[in-house]
Amino acid sequence: MSGGVRIIMFGRQGAGKGTQSARLAEHFGVPHISTGEMLRNAVKQDSVVGRAAKSVLDRGELVDDDLMVSLVQGRIGQVDARVAGYVLDGFPRTIAQAAAFDSLTEARPVGFVIDLDVAREIVLVRLSGRRVCESCSTNYTAPENEPKPWICEKCGGSVVQRTDDTEQAINHRLDVYEAQTAPLITFYHGRGALHVVDGVGSPDEVFGRLTSVVNLSK
Ligand code: ADP
Ligand code: ZN
Protein backbone atom coordinates (compact mmCIF):
# COMPACT_ATOMS: atom_id res chain seq x y z
CA MET A 1 0.00 0.00 0.00
CA SER A 2 1.43 3.37 -0.99
CA GLY A 3 2.17 4.94 2.42
CA GLY A 4 -0.56 5.40 4.99
CA VAL A 5 -3.47 3.52 6.46
CA ARG A 6 -6.76 4.48 4.81
CA ILE A 7 -9.86 2.90 6.28
CA ILE A 8 -13.58 3.33 5.63
CA MET A 9 -15.86 2.16 8.42
CA PHE A 10 -19.45 1.09 7.78
CA GLY A 11 -21.94 0.03 10.38
CA ARG A 12 -25.47 0.71 11.53
CA GLN A 13 -26.13 3.55 13.94
CA GLY A 14 -25.15 2.25 17.36
CA ALA A 15 -22.80 -0.46 16.01
CA GLY A 16 -19.91 1.21 17.82
CA LYS A 17 -18.46 2.72 14.67
CA GLY A 18 -17.61 6.08 16.28
CA THR A 19 -15.92 4.58 19.33
CA GLN A 20 -13.96 1.99 17.35
CA SER A 21 -12.98 4.48 14.63
CA ALA A 22 -11.50 6.79 17.27
CA ARG A 23 -9.52 3.90 18.77
CA LEU A 24 -8.28 2.68 15.39
CA ALA A 25 -7.22 6.20 14.43
CA GLU A 26 -5.24 6.56 17.64
CA HIS A 27 -3.70 3.11 17.22
CA PHE A 28 -2.49 3.79 13.67
CA GLY A 29 -1.63 7.45 14.29
CA VAL A 30 -4.03 8.80 11.68
CA PRO A 31 -6.87 11.34 11.93
CA HIS A 32 -10.39 10.14 12.76
CA ILE A 33 -12.66 11.84 10.26
CA SER A 34 -16.28 11.63 11.40
CA THR A 35 -18.67 13.44 9.08
CA GLY A 36 -21.43 13.37 11.74
CA GLU A 37 -18.99 15.02 14.16
CA MET A 38 -18.00 17.63 11.58
CA LEU A 39 -21.67 18.46 11.02
CA ARG A 40 -22.50 18.59 14.74
CA ASN A 41 -19.56 20.96 15.27
CA ALA A 42 -20.80 23.13 12.43
CA VAL A 43 -24.23 23.26 14.12
CA LYS A 44 -22.62 24.18 17.46
CA GLN A 45 -20.67 26.98 15.82
CA ASP A 46 -23.79 28.12 13.96
CA SER A 47 -21.80 28.30 10.71
CA VAL A 48 -23.40 28.44 7.26
CA VAL A 49 -23.02 24.65 6.90
CA GLY A 50 -24.40 24.17 10.42
CA ARG A 51 -27.48 26.24 9.73
CA ALA A 52 -28.14 24.31 6.53
CA ALA A 53 -27.68 20.94 8.26
CA LYS A 54 -29.40 21.34 11.66
CA SER A 55 -32.97 20.38 10.73
CA VAL A 56 -31.78 17.61 8.38
CA LEU A 57 -29.76 16.07 11.21
CA ASP A 58 -32.61 16.30 13.70
CA ARG A 59 -34.96 14.52 11.29
CA GLY A 60 -32.39 11.76 10.76
CA GLU A 61 -32.11 12.49 7.05
CA LEU A 62 -29.02 12.71 4.90
CA VAL A 63 -27.25 15.96 4.18
CA ASP A 64 -26.81 16.87 0.52
CA ASP A 65 -24.21 14.75 -1.35
CA ASP A 66 -22.31 17.69 -2.89
CA LEU A 67 -21.92 19.38 0.47
CA MET A 68 -20.68 16.16 2.05
CA VAL A 69 -18.22 15.49 -0.75
CA SER A 70 -16.74 18.96 -0.50
CA LEU A 71 -16.44 18.69 3.30
CA VAL A 72 -14.59 15.38 3.01
CA GLN A 73 -12.47 16.57 0.10
CA GLY A 74 -11.30 19.51 2.19
CA ARG A 75 -10.50 17.31 5.16
CA ILE A 76 -8.61 14.51 3.40
CA GLY A 77 -6.60 17.13 1.54
CA GLN A 78 -5.08 18.38 4.78
CA VAL A 79 -1.50 17.41 5.43
CA ASP A 80 -2.09 14.94 8.30
CA ALA A 81 -4.46 12.85 6.19
CA ARG A 82 -2.35 13.14 3.05
CA VAL A 83 0.73 11.88 4.84
CA ALA A 84 -0.58 9.34 7.32
CA GLY A 85 -4.03 8.35 6.04
CA TYR A 86 -7.32 8.34 7.94
CA VAL A 87 -10.21 6.44 9.43
CA LEU A 88 -13.31 7.68 7.65
CA ASP A 89 -16.43 7.30 9.80
CA GLY A 90 -19.83 8.10 8.29
CA PHE A 91 -18.78 8.65 4.68
CA PRO A 92 -19.55 7.60 1.97
CA ARG A 93 -23.20 7.02 2.75
CA THR A 94 -24.71 6.97 -0.74
CA ILE A 95 -23.64 5.55 -4.10
CA ALA A 96 -23.16 9.11 -5.40
CA GLN A 97 -20.79 9.89 -2.51
CA ALA A 98 -18.85 6.66 -3.10
CA ALA A 99 -18.46 7.43 -6.81
CA ALA A 100 -17.24 10.97 -6.07
CA PHE A 101 -14.88 9.61 -3.42
CA ASP A 102 -13.42 7.15 -5.92
CA SER A 103 -12.35 9.91 -8.24
CA LEU A 104 -11.00 12.04 -5.38
CA THR A 105 -8.83 9.20 -4.15
CA GLU A 106 -7.56 7.76 -7.42
CA ALA A 107 -3.95 8.52 -6.49
CA ARG A 108 -4.30 7.23 -2.92
CA PRO A 109 -7.10 4.66 -2.84
CA VAL A 110 -8.63 3.40 0.35
CA GLY A 111 -6.98 0.26 1.71
CA PHE A 112 -9.65 -1.25 3.98
CA VAL A 113 -13.40 -1.14 3.97
CA ILE A 114 -14.84 -2.53 7.16
CA ASP A 115 -18.43 -3.40 7.92
CA LEU A 116 -18.86 -3.41 11.67
CA ASP A 117 -21.78 -5.78 11.84
CA VAL A 118 -24.43 -5.57 14.57
CA ALA A 119 -28.05 -6.62 13.99
CA ARG A 120 -30.80 -4.00 14.01
CA GLU A 121 -32.52 -5.47 17.10
CA ILE A 122 -29.30 -5.08 19.07
CA VAL A 123 -28.46 -1.52 17.98
CA LEU A 124 -31.98 -0.37 18.86
CA VAL A 125 -31.38 -1.36 22.46
CA ARG A 126 -27.93 0.24 22.51
CA LEU A 127 -29.17 3.51 21.01
CA SER A 128 -31.93 4.06 23.54
CA GLY A 129 -29.21 4.22 26.22
CA ARG A 130 -26.64 6.14 24.18
CA ARG A 131 -25.41 9.37 25.75
CA VAL A 132 -22.66 11.67 24.61
CA CYS A 133 -20.50 14.37 26.17
CA GLU A 134 -21.44 17.72 24.67
CA SER A 135 -17.86 18.96 24.93
CA CYS A 136 -15.52 16.10 24.00
CA SER A 137 -17.97 13.69 22.26
CA THR A 138 -17.10 10.68 24.43
CA ASN A 139 -19.90 8.11 24.19
CA TYR A 140 -21.51 6.62 27.31
CA THR A 141 -24.25 4.10 28.07
CA ALA A 142 -26.88 5.25 30.53
CA PRO A 143 -26.96 3.14 33.72
CA GLU A 144 -30.27 2.29 35.35
CA ASN A 145 -29.97 5.17 37.81
CA GLU A 146 -28.87 7.77 35.36
CA PRO A 147 -27.07 10.69 37.07
CA LYS A 148 -28.77 14.03 36.44
CA PRO A 149 -26.93 16.19 35.67
CA TRP A 150 -24.28 13.79 34.38
CA ILE A 151 -20.72 15.13 34.21
CA CYS A 152 -18.18 13.69 31.74
CA GLU A 153 -15.33 11.94 33.55
CA LYS A 154 -12.85 12.94 30.84
CA CYS A 155 -13.50 16.66 30.53
CA GLY A 156 -16.19 17.78 32.99
CA GLY A 157 -18.68 18.55 30.17
CA SER A 158 -22.39 17.62 30.29
CA VAL A 159 -23.36 14.12 29.21
CA VAL A 160 -26.66 14.27 27.30
CA GLN A 161 -28.76 12.41 24.75
CA ARG A 162 -28.10 13.47 21.14
CA THR A 163 -31.00 15.49 19.72
CA ASP A 164 -31.22 12.99 16.85
CA ASP A 165 -31.40 9.98 19.18
CA THR A 166 -35.18 10.15 19.53
CA GLU A 167 -36.98 6.87 18.78
CA GLN A 168 -38.48 8.29 15.61
CA ALA A 169 -35.22 9.71 14.24
CA ILE A 170 -33.35 6.50 15.14
CA ASN A 171 -35.83 4.32 13.26
CA HIS A 172 -35.67 6.67 10.33
CA ARG A 173 -31.83 6.65 10.27
CA LEU A 174 -31.82 2.85 10.35
CA ASP A 175 -34.26 2.73 7.40
CA VAL A 176 -32.12 5.23 5.49
CA TYR A 177 -29.06 3.09 6.29
CA GLU A 178 -30.67 -0.06 4.83
CA ALA A 179 -31.92 1.78 1.76
CA GLN A 180 -28.96 4.02 0.89
CA THR A 181 -25.85 2.85 2.70
CA ALA A 182 -26.14 -0.96 2.86
CA PRO A 183 -25.90 -1.17 -0.98
CA LEU A 184 -22.41 0.32 -0.67
CA ILE A 185 -21.31 -2.73 1.26
CA THR A 186 -22.17 -4.84 -1.79
CA PHE A 187 -20.37 -2.30 -3.98
CA TYR A 188 -17.10 -2.63 -2.01
CA HIS A 189 -17.54 -6.37 -1.59
CA GLY A 190 -17.55 -6.67 -5.38
CA ARG A 191 -14.07 -5.15 -5.42
CA GLY A 192 -12.75 -7.59 -2.87
CA ALA A 193 -11.97 -4.77 -0.44
CA LEU A 194 -14.56 -5.56 2.20
CA HIS A 195 -13.97 -7.05 5.65
CA VAL A 196 -16.99 -7.91 7.76
CA VAL A 197 -16.18 -7.70 11.47
CA ASP A 198 -18.55 -8.87 14.20
CA GLY A 199 -19.40 -5.83 16.35
CA VAL A 200 -20.99 -7.79 19.20
CA GLY A 201 -18.76 -8.14 22.25
CA SER A 202 -16.88 -5.89 24.64
CA PRO A 203 -15.23 -2.80 23.13
CA ASP A 204 -11.81 -4.44 23.67
CA GLU A 205 -12.85 -7.67 21.94
CA VAL A 206 -14.21 -5.79 18.95
CA PHE A 207 -11.10 -3.61 18.79
CA GLY A 208 -8.93 -6.73 18.79
CA ARG A 209 -10.86 -8.14 15.81
CA LEU A 210 -10.48 -4.86 13.93
CA THR A 211 -6.75 -4.49 14.45
CA SER A 212 -6.12 -8.08 13.44
CA VAL A 213 -8.00 -7.54 10.18
CA VAL A 214 -5.97 -4.43 9.36
CA ASN A 215 -2.62 -5.87 10.49
CA LEU A 216 -3.08 -9.17 8.66
CA SER A 217 -3.80 -7.59 5.33
CA LYS A 218 -1.47 -4.60 5.56
P1 ADP B 1 -25.35 8.02 13.04
O1 ADP B 1 -24.46 6.98 12.41
O2 ADP B 1 -25.82 7.65 14.40
O3 ADP B 1 -26.46 8.46 12.14
P2 ADP B 1 -23.40 10.13 12.49
O4 ADP B 1 -22.70 10.93 13.54
O5 ADP B 1 -22.58 9.29 11.59
O6 ADP B 1 -24.46 9.30 13.31
O7 ADP B 1 -24.27 11.08 11.57
C1 ADP B 1 -25.23 11.97 12.10
C2 ADP B 1 -26.03 12.64 10.98
O8 ADP B 1 -25.15 13.43 10.17
C3 ADP B 1 -26.70 11.71 9.98
O9 ADP B 1 -27.96 11.25 10.44
C4 ADP B 1 -26.84 12.62 8.76
O10 ADP B 1 -27.91 13.53 8.90
C5 ADP B 1 -25.57 13.42 8.80
N1 ADP B 1 -24.48 12.81 8.01
C6 ADP B 1 -23.30 12.32 8.47
N2 ADP B 1 -22.53 11.83 7.47
C7 ADP B 1 -23.26 12.02 6.33
C8 ADP B 1 -23.03 11.72 4.96
N3 ADP B 1 -21.90 11.13 4.54
N4 ADP B 1 -24.00 12.05 4.07
C9 ADP B 1 -25.13 12.65 4.46
N5 ADP B 1 -25.41 12.96 5.73
C10 ADP B 1 -24.49 12.65 6.67
ZN1 ZN C 1 -16.23 15.14 27.85
Image: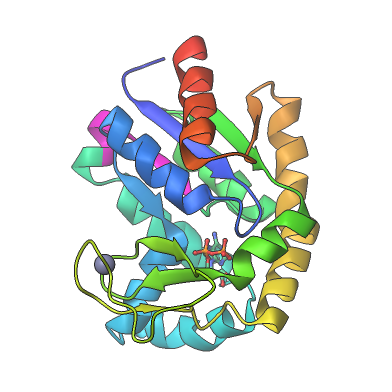
**Which residue is at the front of the view, 124 or 180?**
124
Q: Is residue 218 visible?
A: no
- Name the image quarter holding residue 166: bottom right
49 relative to 32, above or below: below
56 relative to 144, above or below: below
Residue at 61% from the left image edge and 67% from the top image edge? 127
- Number of marks drawn: 0
In the image, taking residue 68 as reference, residue 174 lies left or right, namely right
Residue 80 location, x and y as percent? 21, 40
Image quarter for ligand 1 equals bottom right
Residue 5 within the magenta-colored segment of the rendering: no
Q: How is the image coloured?
A: rainbow
Residue at 58% from the left image edge and 32% from the top image edge? 113
Residue 190 location, x and y as percent? 76, 27
In the image, taking residue 198 as reference, residue 104 lies left or right, namely left
In the image, taking residue 59 as reference, residue 152 lies left or right, namely left
- What stretch of residues is rendered in magenta? 81-89
**Which residue is at the front of the view, 38 or 99?**
38
Residue at 57% from the left image edge and 82% from the top image edge? 56
Residue 55 location, x and y as percent? 54, 88
Residue 49 location, x and y as percent? 39, 79
- Name the image quarter holding residue 158: bottom left
193 relative to 75, above or below: above
- Name the image quarter holding residue 25: top left
Locate the N terminus and report the quarter of the image it occupies: top left
4 relative to 166, above or below: above
Residue at 68% from the left image edge and 33% from the top image edge? 188
Q: Is residue 82 visible?
A: yes
**Which residue is at the front of the view, 187 or 151?**
151
